[in-house]
Amino acid sequence: MLFAIITYCFFKAKTRRGDFWSKYGPVILVMMSLPLIMADPLRHVLQDADLWKAPSSSEYRSDCHDETFRCLSALGVFFTVVFTYMGFAFLITGTMWNANLCDKLRQIRSEWQAIRAEHSGS
């Protein structure tokens, strides 16, 4: 699905005007989100297949027996929290930028204000 969103953003970028970042910023953000979002599932797959066996690859600290947020190791915090949430933040920002959502919301607000002004004047 992310590849489809990246492809859509890329083709949409060709219709934009401006400098490189204005045109391709949404594509770059969505592309950066892909490896960040997929890092934790990939880590799980590598550990389940015994391809990543190092003791430091554990998501949880060895001295903690609960699988809770408090028991996450440094690697667990980075993969589970930092990478995943940063990836979703990039994805949301890139897709909202691609959809030109801020300008559309400004237009809705100005139209709403015009309707309210017209209604209060009657």
Image: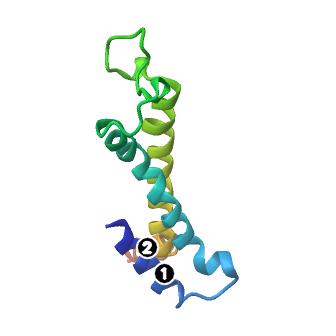
Q: Secondary structure at mark 1?
A: helix
Residue at (43, 23) in percent of width and height: 72
- Residue 70 higher or lower than 94, as above or below: above
Q: Which quadrant is home to the N terminus? A: bottom left
Q: Point out residue 85 in the picture as x, y percentages from the top left corner.
A: 46, 45
Occupied quadrant, residue 121: bottom left
Task: Tell me the distance, in whole angstroms, between the alpha carbons under discs 1 and 2.
Answer: 6 Å
Q: Residue furthest top?
A: 63
- Amino acid, disc 1: Phe
Residue at (48, 77) in percent of width and height: 107
Judge from the rendering whether residue 43 lies leftward or rightward of residue 29; answer left or right.
Answer: left
- Amino acid, disc 2: Ile
Quickly name the residue at label 2: 6
Q: Which quadrant is home to the C terminus? A: bottom left
Q: Point out residue 117 in the picture as x, y percentages from the top left corner.
A: 45, 74
Is 55 in front, or is 79? 55
Is 64 in front, or is 8? 64
- Residue 36 higher or lower than 56, as above or below: below
Quickly name the residue at label 1: 10
Q: Point out residue 99 in the picture as x, y percentages from the top left corner.
A: 44, 75
Q: Are marks 1 and 2 in contact (CB under 8 Å)?
A: yes
Residue at (46, 38) in percent of width and height: 79
